[in-house]
Image: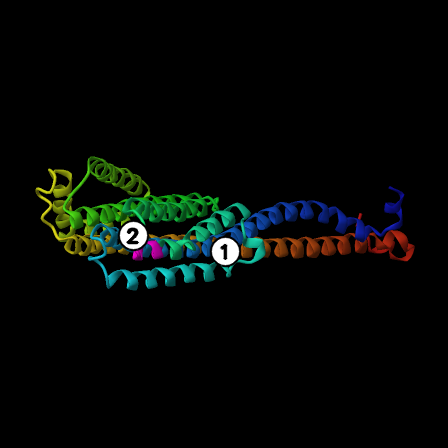
Amino acid sequence: MSFLTNISIKLKIVILFLIPALALIYQTSSISFDLYKTIQEDTAVSKYVVIATNISALVHESQKERGMTAGFLASQGKKFVFELPKQRTITDQKLSILKKSLKTLSESEKIPVLMNDIHSAIEEADRLSSIRNRVSSLSIDKKEAIHYYTALNGELLDTIGSVVKTSSNAKVTELASSYLSFLYAKERVGIERAIGAGVFATKHISVDAKVKFTELIAEQTAYLKVFKILSSKTALDFYKEVSRKQVNADVENMAKKILYANGAEGLDVDASVWFKTITKKIDLLKSVEDKLTKELILSIEKTKEESSHALFFSLAVNIVILLIVLSLSIMISNNITGSMRPLHNPKDLSTLNF
């Protein structure tokens, strides 16, 4: 410690004050770094949420294409002849938007496991062309076609589940889980639409199809229960409002015809009427989905804003602490050295008060 003897008293006093100040600055800097990481995470999560909304938009259109495909195949190409090609174009547009949104991610924002899941789902979506060709030529079984679309939608929705895990914020995770549960419920309604289109087109339902139809309704109820538990009051109120629309009762009445059908008896609904009616219901569900998406994005933006303010405050505190400590240490050291000056100069001893 001999170096201390070679420095001035003024510098020693500055060091004395600076050591605890630096310790305090280190502590606040750690908080600042954590806040910075939170902001970085929220920025990445917000981009992934946009990607998730593009995935759900693709699923929404794929669900329509699945329903039309089921009706087309069940009627041996007589139903949805004009509607199906148009729907395929819309589905392709949503797939293109999804692919473009992935390019907005920087290399540092890409999570390898999540990106692998998304790319795997997109590769499955790229098989649409070959499936469509088989559908158009009526060379694919209805069950196989529906299974392809259902598996594709399931894989796409599972990637949204992976997006949910990217956030460490409890509130964001809760809202994202509510959003995901709602999407799974909506997917079940989409499968219900496809099965119903096939049943009403052929005026026949097998035992397996009736069991599957019953399971779908039960699964919808289960997923919606989770959604209701985790959703905000605003989202839940909006869902209740949508659920009171007449179209929901109309779909339920048609669904009962399938559940209680005995052969062709009771299946007196036109496949196109069923499809249009349940599509109106699904479009209403899409409006709820859109509201959940906005709520989720706003929650992330609010978290980012709060973290940014906290980070700014933390940095400001560090600067203020440093300035105060330096100012005080210089003032005190000047005062002390000024008081000690007469000790070094005998002529000034008379200025000391005893």
Badge 1, how many Cα within 10 Å: few under 14, some, many 20+? some
Which of the 4 image quarters holds residue 129?
bottom left
Q: Which residue is mark 2?
A: 66
Query: Where residue 116 sits in the image (x, y, percent)?
Result: 51, 48
- In the image, what residue occupies the spot 46% across and 52% down? 123
Query: Where residue 216 sits in the image (x, y, percent)?
Result: 25, 40
Residue type, label 1: Thr
Query: Where residue 68 sits in the image (x, y, percent)?
Result: 25, 55
Badge 2, how many Cα within 10 Å: few under 14, some, many 20+? many
Q: Is residue 136 magenta?
A: yes
| 304, 235: nearer the viewer | 235
Residue 46 in view, yes or no: yes
Residue furthest to the right: 346
- In the image, what residue occupies the spot 19% across and 54% down? 275
| 59, 152: nearer the viewer | 152
Q: Earlier in the sequence, mark 2 or mark 1?
A: 1
Q: Which residue is mark 1?
A: 43
Label 2, label 1: how far apart the Cα atoms are = 35 Å
- In the image, what residue occupies the spot 22% across and 59% down? 80
Indicate the secondary structure of the residue bearing disc 2. Answer: helix
The reply to whether callout 2 and callout 1 are in contact (CB within 8 Å) is no
Numbered range of the magenta stretch: 132-138
Residue 294 in view, yes or no: no
- In the image, what residue occupies the spot 51% across and 61% down? 103
